Image (cartoon, rainbow, N blue to C red):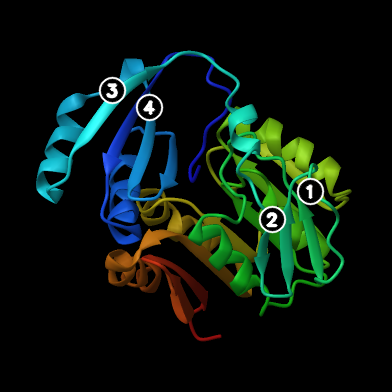
Amino acid sequence: MTRKGHFFMETYIEVLIESSGQEQSSFFIATLDKNGYTGFLEEINCLKAYIPAANFQPVVVAELCSSQGCSFSIKHIEPTNWNERWESSFHPVYVENFAVIRATFHAPVKEVTHEIIINPKMSFGTGHHATTFLMIQQMQKLELRNKRVLDFGTGTGILAILADKMGASYTLAIDNDRWSIENAKENLLLNHTAGVQLETAAYPPDNVQFDLIFANINRSVLLKFIPTLSKNLSVAGSVLISGFLKEDQDLLIQAAKDANLSMVTILHKDEWLSILFNKAGV
């Protein structure tokens, strides 16, 4: 699963799209995410996308698949505990020897700098998706000791947890999804984090400065909030973003430039990108 989700407490529609590979699946994820889809499961040669039945619009999928020359099928998913199916296929994720992300049902890992325990319950952020992997990869090069951090759209809380482990003095983790907040709360306890404040919020706090801001969310949200995030930065602060495709690179860089941010580093994995920005002139 690569986007937010939870126990299915209502009827969902599963759309199975025959895809030609990672690049096409990434395109579908980025597009359907903007149309109300709350979960994705990437499998060999196909993508499964999930949306509440009440929000499902067949014409959206039909037109999208027609433009890509691929077929799709749908089925109804009745309320169920998705986690039981999810756990059977979850494996630890290694980001070099810097970090490993594992669940409670995995054995402890000692040969890495940071071990992060995540029981996602379908919230976004397990390290399996390229965007979370890229964020962690970028964080490896950052100095977080005694820094103030904002994790905007925290999902499972994974980046906030890592920031705390890397020595941040204070981390504010926010999300507007109540399932993510409940999940992040559990994960913070599992990792014994002491310096993370978790809040339900759709907007960054007013008049609060941070040394580092992490935002692993979709393109439309990034474009909306980049100016706000820039205002939340301290003079020598940095913003690290992901959640968008290579084709969106120029658009995000221009938006950041307009918000007085200068590009520092770009990393990519598959068709996904992560970009680190500093305050312009720093």
Q: What is the C-alpha distance between the residues marked 2 and 4?
A: 27 Å
Q: Is residue 138 above or below residue 148?
A: below
Q: Which residue is mark 2?
A: 92
| Camera-nearest label, 3 or 1 | 1
Q: Are marks 1 and 2 in contact (CB under 8 Å)?
A: yes
Q: How many neighbours does mark 2 have within 10 angstroms: few (below 14), some (14-19), or many (20 or more)?
A: some
Quadrant in which the C terminus appears: bottom right
Q: CA distance from mark 4 to mark 1?
A: 30 Å
- Give the quadrant of residue 84: top right
The residue where tag 3 is placed is: 56
Disc 3 to disc 2, C-alpha distance: 33 Å
Residue 242's spot in the image, x, y percent?
47, 61
Left or right of residue 231, residue 142 in this image: right
Badge 3 density bin: few <14, some 14–19, many ≥20, Cα 10 Å = some
User: Which corner quadrant of the image does residue 89 belong to?
Assistant: top right
Mark found first going from the N terminus, 3 or 4:
4
Are the two marked residues, 3 and 1, in contact with CB atoms closer than 8 angstroms? Answer: no
Q: Amino acid at mark 2?
A: Pro
Mark 1 burial class by Cα count in 10 Å: few <14, some 14-19, many 20+: few
Marks 1 and 2, the one that precedes in the sequence: 2
Q: Are marks 3 and 4 in contact (CB under 8 Å)?
A: yes
Residue occupying image coordinates x 42% and y 55%: 222
- Left or right side of 28 for 3: right
Provide the residue designation for mark 1: 106
The tag earlier along the polypeptide, 2 or 4, is: 4
Q: Secondary structure at mark 1?
A: loop
In primary-sequence order, the first of circles 3 and 1 is 3
In this picture, is 277 found above or below 34?
below
Residue 148, x across and y down, in percent: 74, 63
The residue at which mark 4 appears reads as 51
Q: Earlier in the sequence, mark 4 or mark 1?
A: 4
